[in-house]
Image (spheres, rainbow, N blue to C red):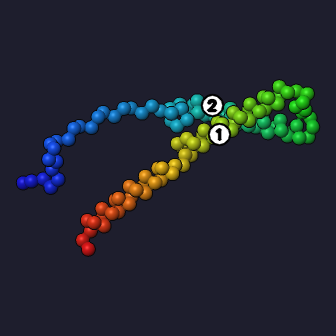
Amino acid sequence: MTTPHSDPGGPSRPAPPKRPARPSTFRSGYPRVRAAVWLSALVCGGLVLVLVFFATIGVVDFSEAPVVGIAALAMALFFIVTMWGFSRSATGARPTANAAASSRRRHSVAFRRLREERPG
């Protein structure tokens, strides 16, 4: 009895051992830290909205209190960067163009094989 697909070069080498994946902070590793960062970013974003509202109606003057303006900018930056990071995490990440192209290639090769194997 012969095997249909034998390798003339001999048996193949065993696969190298897989390395354990390191968990990402934003993806799975530390859910309490993730929740704390998310909550603090939301609080900062809310405070920025309150400061902007009071500056709009004239109660807060950033020219008289530049430290408040700098703090508002820092909190807004923290909010934007954190929410951007969370949108890119495992729950909200979108596949990249390379991943989509790789998926299309993989599927087209599989469909081509099916067409070739199917009796016509």
Q: Within 10 angstroms of label 2, few (less than 14), some, or many (20 or more) residues? A: few
Q: Is mark 1 on a helix, strand or loop?
A: helix
From the top left corner, tell me how far across and down residue 33 is, in percent. Answer: 58, 29
> Dividing the image into 4 quarters, which one contains the C terminus?
bottom left
Asked if residue 74 can be seen in this view, the reply is yes
Q: Position of residue 69 (x, y in %)?
A: 82, 31
- Disc 2 to disc 1, C-alpha distance: 13 Å
Can you say whether 92 is above or below 60 in the image?
A: below
Q: Circle 2 — which element? A: helix
- Residue type of the residue flagged with mark 1: Met
Residue 7 percent across, percent down from the top left: 16, 48
User: Mark 2 against mark 1, which lies toward the viewer?
Assistant: 1
Which of the two residues, 34 or 16, is positioned nearer the viewer here?
Answer: 16
Which residue in the structure is indicated by mark 2? 36
Q: Which residue lies furthest to the front in this view?
A: 9
Q: Which residue is drawn at 57% across and 31% down?
A: 32
Furthest toward the bottom, the residue is 120
Name the image quarter holding the N terminus. bottom left
Residue 44 appears left or right of 98: right
Task: Give x and y (percent) for residue 77.
Answer: 71, 34
Amino acid carrying label 2: it is Ala
Q: Which residue is drawn at 79% across and 29% down?
A: 70
Residue furthest to the right: 58
Q: Name the residue under label 1.
A: 83
Q: Earlier in the sequence, mark 2 or mark 1?
A: 2
Q: In which quarter of the image is residue 118?
A: bottom left
69 or 9, which is in the foreground? 9
Question: Which quadrant of the structure image shows residue 35?
Answer: top right
